[in-house]
Image (cartoon, rainbow, N blue to C red):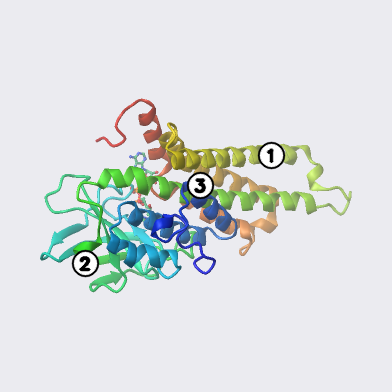
Amino acid sequence: MQQAGVGGLVVPVEKGGLGHGLLALAQACETLGKECASTAICFGMHCVASAVIAAKSTPEQDERYLRPIGAGEHFTTLALSEAGSGSQFYFPQARLQERDDRTYAVTGEKTFVTNGGHADSYVISTGVPGAARGEFSCVTVDADAANLRWGAAWRGFGMRGNASRSLELRETEIPRANLLGSHGDELWYVFNVIAPYFLAAMAGTYLGVADAAFSEARLHLRRRTYAATGRSLAGEAVVQHRLGRLWARLESARRLTYYAAMQGDSGGADALPAILSSKAEVAEAAVDVVNEAMTLSGGIAYAENAKLQRHLRDARAAHVMAPPTDILRTWTGRVLLDLPLLSD
Ligand SMILES: Cc1cc2nc3c(=O)[nH]c(=O)nc-3n(C[C@H](O)[C@H](O)[C@H](O)COP(=O)(O)OP(=O)(O)OC[C@H]3O[C@@H](n4cnc5c(N)ncnc54)[C@H](O)[C@@H]3O)c2cc1C
């Protein structure tokens, strides 16, 4: 993707990027996800982290990160999750301490860092000691910083090319210039940048997975004929009906994702509930469509190296990757009831 000139997909034009937003990110991830969900998420997390850096970047951050990203020379990624915070990724336990007037020290352990060990920089969420729950800052940590210890290689049920490793930081020194925005910007980052870009990348990725599975099943139904009668499987009314239902499931999720991304890009009134719901709808549609596609494609799809079994394993990650489906549904309801998203 960097060689193709799209590394700076969501970086503003004046900072060296292509200036696209949520719709382009969702569609790029969808395109990649049709072939490989891991590749799509690796690129997606690079874009989410790029957007976080770009949101309130300083001139120094433009030169150190955003222009190289636009030039395809810098790969970044997002490290929010921790074992302690799990789905509540907005309550990090990692700590940022003032070392001297030029440096901070970061201590904590991040889990499931996509692109772990491969990126040039990591966008990390961290709280300051004594801060209230939910008050955190985002900082960049360069790959060559001292005291970074990577966990074991990632061996997932699916998403196996994702390199989602854990990262331990032990008083890792970073320049103060690596602070993104100001202390106190945390919820602004979570709901204006991290969540919309993260959700668009994931919705796009798993739409691609569902689309690929649907195409596989359709191809199988068209090609499969039976020796005794010479009839095609496509002639069976039950499979016609099942394929029709899957098409509608996939297209509804796709249309909601595109609508949500366009609402987000234009600041539309429906943006938040649409963005939250789109990833939940895609997660449910992806698992349903891939699962059914496997049934329709018969024994050949169940073989060890068949594409559909990889799609099925990959699709399951859509529910787990934060925010998980149940939380997204709850948040959507809270938005519609004018209630705060986060509550005890
Ligand atoms: C392939 C993959 C890639 C990932 N990449 C990244 C990455 O690049 N960066 C990053 O920061 N993180 C990443 N993650 C981490 C991912 O976002 C975590 O899996 C997530 O934070 C969930 O945390 P947990 O596993 O501790 O779930 P838990 O917090 O233990 O939750 C388990 C389940 O409980 C349910 N649940 C939890 N809370 C609630 C609630 N309030 N209401 C209703 N149900 C609830 C949900 O179904 C949830 O799936 C990745 C994960 C995977 C699998």
Residue at 28% in and 37% down:
342
* Left or right: where 1 falls relative to 15: right
Mark 2 crowdedness (10 Å alpha carbons): few <14, some 14-19, many ≥20: many
Q: Which residue is mark 3?
A: 23
- Marks 2 and 1, Cα distance to the nearest angstrom? 55 Å
Mark nearest the camera among 3 and 1 is: 3
First reached walking from the N terminus: tag 2 or tag 1: 2
Q: Position of residue 269 (x, y in %)?
A: 42, 31
- Marks 3 and 2, Cα distance to the nearest angstrom? 33 Å
Residue at 46% in and 36% down:
274
- Marks 3 and 1, Cα distance to the nearest angstrom? 30 Å
Badge 3 vs badge 1, beta-carbon distance below 8 Å: no
Q: Tell me the element at label 3.
A: helix
Badge 2 vs badge 1, beta-carbon distance below 8 Å: no
Q: Position of residue 146 (x, y in %)?
A: 23, 74
First reached walking from the N terminus: tag 3 or tag 2: 3
Badge 3 vs badge 2, beta-carbon distance below 8 Å: no
Locate residue 96: give its quadrant. Answer: bottom left
- 147 or 175: nearer the viewer: 175
- Which disc number belongs to residue 242? 1
Mark 3 crowdedness (10 Å alpha carbons): few <14, some 14-19, many ≥20: many
For badge 1, the amino acid type reads Arg
Looking at the rendered image, the quarter that the C terminus falls into is top left
Outermost right residue: 229
Q: Which residue is mark 2?
A: 174
Mark 1 crowdedness (10 Å alpha carbons): few <14, some 14-19, many ≥20: few
